[in-house]
Image (cartoon, helix red, strand yellow):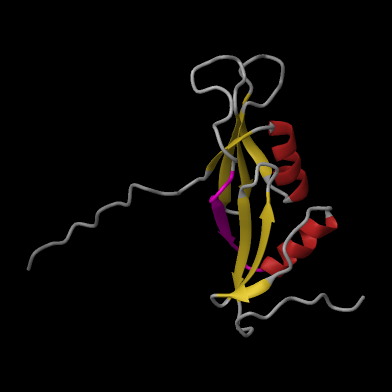
């Protein structure tokens, strides 16, 4: 009887890396608005300005880096609109709770609807990247969320 060797999985996580036009605006959106926590950062110039960071929300993560404007290779923003065609989907336990939290913080979010058996609420960050929060549901397809009366 042949022995099977279990191969250890090497790849552990995919982390979106968004180049942004304003780190300050992006941090306001992701940290103050969506509740991400900055767990790592790069401040190379000694001025305390964050040039790159790693943000976490629950078990999900993303990275941000501001385009450099110092005539350095790969500096400045690319041609065209940032965020065009880019979206990231965060699968969570309760997308409706995320929706209520972010709108309470003053962030504009699309009213949740059911698509592919999931509640989906979508937001756009300051550079136009689309951020979706989704959670599984038994609600009928194309249902639209209506807030409970206060």
Q: Is residue 148 shown above or below 89?
A: below
Q: Is residue 104 magenta?
A: no
Quadrant for the N terminus in the image? bottom left
Q: Please provide the residue range marked out in magenta.
A: 83-94
117 relative to 92, above or below? below
Q: Tell me which residue sits at (67%, 81%) in the image.
A: 143
**Residue farthest to the left, as pictured:** 1
**Along the viewing direction, whichever of 38 and 105 lies nearer the viewer:** 105
Measured from the top left, where is residue 49 in percent x and y?
70, 23
> Which quadrant would the C terminus be assigned to in this image?
bottom right
Residue at far front of view: 80
* In this picture, residue 9 sits left or right of residue 44: left
Q: Position of residue 25 (x, y in %)?
A: 74, 37
Q: Residue at coordinates 53% horizontally, 15% vertically from top-left?
A: 72
Instruction: Residue 139 in the image: state x and y as whole percent.
Output: 64, 83
77 or 43, nearer to the observer: 77
Residue under the image location 63 percent in, 79 percent down: 142
| 4 on left or right of 27 | left
Residue 41 to residue 35: above or below:
above
The answer to which image quadrant residue 145 occupies is bottom right
Q: How many marks overall?
A: 0
Q: Is residue 105 left or right of residue 52?
A: right
């Amino acid at each position: 009887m042949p022995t099977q060797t279990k191969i250890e999985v090497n790849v552990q996580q995919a982390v979106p890396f968004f180049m942004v036009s304003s780190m300050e605006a992006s941090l306001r959106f992701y940290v103050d608005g969506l509740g991400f926590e900055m767990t790592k950062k790069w401040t190379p110039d000694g001025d305390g300005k964050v040039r790159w960071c790693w943000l976490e929300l629950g078990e999900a993560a993303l990275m941000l880096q501001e385009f450099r404007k110092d005539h350095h290779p790969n500096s400045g923003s690319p041609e065209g609109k940032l965020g065009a065609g880019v979206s990231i989907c965060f699968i969570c336990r309760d997308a409706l709770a995320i929706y209520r939290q972010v709108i309470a913080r003053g962030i504009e979010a699309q009213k949740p609807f059911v698509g592919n058996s999931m509640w989906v609420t979508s937001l756009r960050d300051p550079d136009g990247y689309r951020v979706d929060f989704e959670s599984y549901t038994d609600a009928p397809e194309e249902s639209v969320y209506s807030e409970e009366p206060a």
